[in-house]
Amino acid sequence: MSSSKGQEGSAVPTKQKGSWSSFLKSIASFNGDLSSMTAPAFILSTTSLVEFSSYWTEHPSVFVAPAAEKDPAKRMLLVLKWFLSTLKQQYASRSEKLGSEKKPLNPFLGELFLGKWEDAAGETQLVSEQVSHHPPVTAYSIWNSKHGVRLQGYNAQKASFKTTINVKQVGHAMYHIDGFNEDYLITLPPLHIEGLVVGAPYVELNSATYIQSSSGYTAKIEYSGRGWVSGKSNSFTASIYPEDKKKEPIYTAEGQWTGKFHFKDPKTKQIVDTFDHAAIKPTPLSILPVEQQDDFESRKAWKKVADAINKGDLDTTSAEKSIIENRQRVMRKAEKEQGKEWERKFFKRVQKDPVFEKLAAKIGEQVNQDATNGVWNFDQEKASAAKSPFHPDVNPPIYVDTGDLSRTSTKSTAA
Ligand code: HC3
């Protein structure tokens, strides 16, 4: 598969400075729905938001590591370590590789992104599905059967403008370990965009998030940027404590989520664990080549739009986007006439999620169903009934490495 992202380059081209200024003026009064924001052509990404779910598993061995730890406190430390290790890819990978954070494609209802990682941890699989279009909501499930670990979650974004674009994430993730029948509720960080004025936008995280475990431990992570105490961008401090003993941490952590961080035992002040992005190679995600994908799979569905964006061909970009939007409109109209709702392929809307509610109560979190068009859970029955997310009917399926989500390096892997 050839590169389709190679031209997603630096921020504002000199001759487009004018349209960037107009864009800045227009976002100061935008309505809060990020998908409705009209951005200049050079800031358009060829990647759909449905792909972002894969950012949770840059390092499958770190993802599955908690399953092998017998001590519940150390297990919590390993879950926190994995979570922190995902932040770089989630929030900094695009601006690092492409020179700026671009506006992702707004997924259509039913859009899918399917793939797997294969490495020393065995096979780790990904299903990501756009479960709502208004408001835009993406749900995902990532699992490794060999180690009995599963992550599932869903998210939406609510934006506002005050000095810059501020984004609140709605939704949550839940990490589950079969071997200990343990759940970890993960809340999602609010963020804002830095570098807007100079035309090289990037994400900085704000405020705090939590991981609450069913084994009775809480982790609190506090984010800070360049202007804060540490003075460094992408910084954080974290502590792990028994859920009712906030002032008695059993582990602390600090560092930069884009670089290196370490964990300490506060009693001995000794470093007990370290993570360094420079010392660990990410495992690339493999997906089917576009020709073998289902029509609802993201890269196949958006191919013509992505090609047009890469060519800088605005007319074709909007014409191809309109084809997708019109097709969706026709489908919604037919569903309305038949009194039906679009059937999600891998997820179901649930009225209650007792696991979430129990853990959320401990950290003062609440479900916001209106912002996410419901509460979304992975549906094992649907997933088994769906032919297969990985098309076993294509015999044998040939996966291609995505390398990273900028699609700049792709090569054949398995046969
Ligand atoms: C706000 C954001 C879209 C949402 C992205 C999310 C929150 C999606 C879920 C992932 O797990 C984590 C994540 C990472 C980055 C978030 C994006 C950063 C910028 C993008 C805006 C829609 C784009 C704003 C346009 C501009 C001008 C900055 O390019």
Image (cartoon, rainbow, N blue to C red):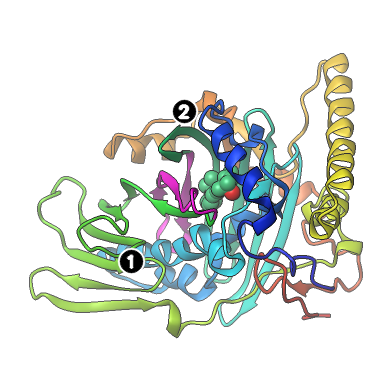
| Residue displayed at 44% across by 77% down | 277
Q: Is residue 49 visible in this depiction of the protein? A: no
Give, as a three-letter code, the residue at label 2. Asn
- Image coordinates of residue 358 in percent, x first then y, are 35, 37
> 144 left or right of 127?
left
| Foreground: disc 1 or disc 2 | 2
The secondary structure type at the circle numbered 2 is loop
Q: Nearer the viewer, residue 406 or 79?
A: 406
- Quadrant for residue 130, please give it: top right
Q: Nearer the viewer, residue 162 or 152?
A: 162
The answer for how far apart the CA atoms under marks 1 and 2 are is 29 Å
Left or right placement of residue 54 versus residue 388 in this view: left
Instruction: Give the percent coordinates (x, y) of residue 394.
Output: 91, 66
**Residue 22, image quadrant:** top right
Residue at 10 percent of width and 55 percent of height: 248
Most extreme residue toward the left is 267
Instruction: Say which residue label 1 marks.
Output: 75
Quadrant for the C terminus, please: bottom right
Q: Nearer the viewer, residue 5 or 212?
A: 5
**Magenta span contains residue 97:** no
Residue 18 at x, y = what percent? 64, 45
The three-letter amino acid code for the residue at tag 1 is Arg
| Neighbour tally class for label 2: few under 14, some 14-19, many 20 plus, Cα within 10 Å | few
The numbered mark at residue 415 is none
Q: Which residue is pictured at 71% across the width and 70% down the height?
A: 402
Q: Is residue 17 left or right of residue 81?
A: right
User: Image point 61% across, 49% down: which residue?
Assistant: 140
Q: Is mark 1 within 8 Å of ligand 1?
A: no
Instruction: Magenta stretch: give its range.
Output: 170-199
Residue tagged by mark 2?
Answer: 368
